[in-house]
Amino acid sequence: MSAPVPAVLDGASVELYAPVGDAQRPTGRTRHSIDSLDEKISHLAIARYDGESDYYLFYCSADWEVLTDTCHPTRQEAIEQADFEFENVEFAPRPTGSERG
């Protein structure tokens, strides 16, 4: 069973999340500086820090450890970055009641 979607990652409030599995293969359009990062990513999350307007695309492990992130001026641009890097990404709102910080 996978870990519940956390309400907060790295101090930022999670708004959307998406699983990364066999159907979400890397497109190869982005090269990361962390070796085999694509193999370690199990979840993507879009979150915002209180008081900030930017959105962060978090790349997370199976247990929701933040491995790296990218910063975007809009939520849509964060989604577009995920789509640029992975096939078939489908974000959903974070379910309520799955609190973890």
Image: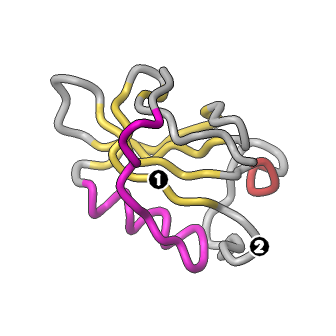
Residue 101 pos. (x, y %) = 48, 20
Name the spot of residue 32 as percent of width and height, x first.
68, 51
CA gap between label 2 and label 1 equals: 17 Å
Q: Total number of numbered labels?
A: 2
Seen at 75% across and 42% down, the residue is 34
Nearer to me, 70 or 8: 8
- Image coords of residue 56 (percent x, y): 38, 42
Tell me the SS state at disc 1.
strand
Q: In the rendered view, does 39 fall on the left or right side of 66?
A: right
Image quadrant assignment for residue 25: bottom right
Q: Which residues are magenta?
A: 75-98
Task: Tell me which residue sits at (50%, 25%) in the image.
Answer: 100
**Which kind of residue does numbered mark 1 sit on?**
Tyr
Q: Earlier in the sequence, mark 2 or mark 1?
A: 1
Side of 11 relative to 61 (left or right): left
Q: Residue furthest front?
A: 97
**What residue lies at 39% left-to-right and 68% top-to-bottom?**
80
The image position of residue 57, as x and y in percent, is 44, 47
Closer to the camera in the image, 22 or 86:
22
Q: Answer with left or right where residue 82 lies relative to residue 37.
A: left
Left or right of residue 78: residue 36: right
Q: Nearer the viewer, residue 9 or 1?
A: 1
Residue 22 marker: 2
Name the residue rendered at 48%, 71% in the picture.
90
What is the three-letter code of the residue carrying label 2? Asp
Residue hosting label 1: 17
Colour mode?
A: secondary structure
The circle drawn on residue 33 is none
- Vertical side of 82 occupied by 12: above or below: above
Decide: few, some or many residues near mark 1? Use Cα within 10 Å; few <14, some 14-19, many ≥20: many
